[in-house]
Image: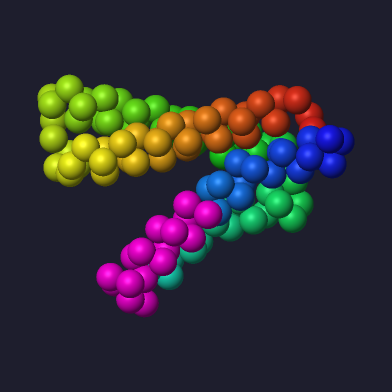
Amino acid sequence: MKAISKYTRFIPYLYFISVILYWFTYSNRTEGISAYPILLFSIPFLWQLIRPNRNLNFSLGIIFVCVSSYMILAYILDILNVVNWFGASSSVLTSIGLIILGNFVMALWMIRNSIQKQF
């Protein structure tokens, strides 16, 4: 149990790295070589895995809480049919909602890790 709790602080970074890699592979199939700058978004998360830094951790958490809050607002407006941004079926909206919720939870988890001084 102690080993599991030791590595749980890395889950948010691995989550965001996996989302970025999925985004890259999807964009690489459609756009080709112009998708490679997407990989630059993973550098701060890889840096946190290699050399943890409390300030970077807290900054990443705050930035992604703000971005996730904006995405939650956009998702709610789309569900209420105020603005139709996604224009997709309900199954796609469900998966988008789960990704948005996952981003928000992982961002809060990063902030919690930086406040608890686990590094």
Q: Is residue 4 magenta?
A: no
The x, y position of residue 55, in whole percent, is 68, 37
The answer to whether 116 appears left or right of 22 in the picture is: right
- For the C terminus, the image quarter is top right
The residue depicted at 71 percent of the width and 52 percent of the height is: 49
The answer to whether residue 119 is visible is: no
> Looking at the rendering, which quadrant does residue 43 occupy?
bottom right
The x, y position of residue 20, in whole percent, is 47, 55
The x, y position of residue 99, in whole percent, is 41, 40
* Vertical arrangement, residue 48 with respect to residue 55, above or below: below
The answer to whether 93 appears left or right of 119 in the picture is: left
Q: Name the residue nearer the viewer: 113 or 62.
A: 113
Q: Main secondary structure of the magenta part?
A: helix
Q: Name the residue nearer the viewer: 73 or 41.
A: 73
The residue depicted at 61 percent of the width and 31 percent of the height is: 109
Q: How is the image coloured?
A: rainbow
The residue depicted at 71 percent of the width and 25 percent of the height is: 115
* Vertical arrangement, residue 85 with respect to residue 76, above or below: below
Q: Name the residue nearer the viewer: 39 or 22.
A: 22
Q: Which residues are magenta?
A: 18-33
The residue depicted at 60 percent of the width and 41 percent of the height is: 12
The x, y position of residue 17, in whole percent, is 55, 54
Q: Name the residue nearer the viewer: 105 or 52.
A: 105
The answer to whether residue 75 is visible is: yes
> Looking at the rendering, which quadrant does residue 69 occupy?
top left
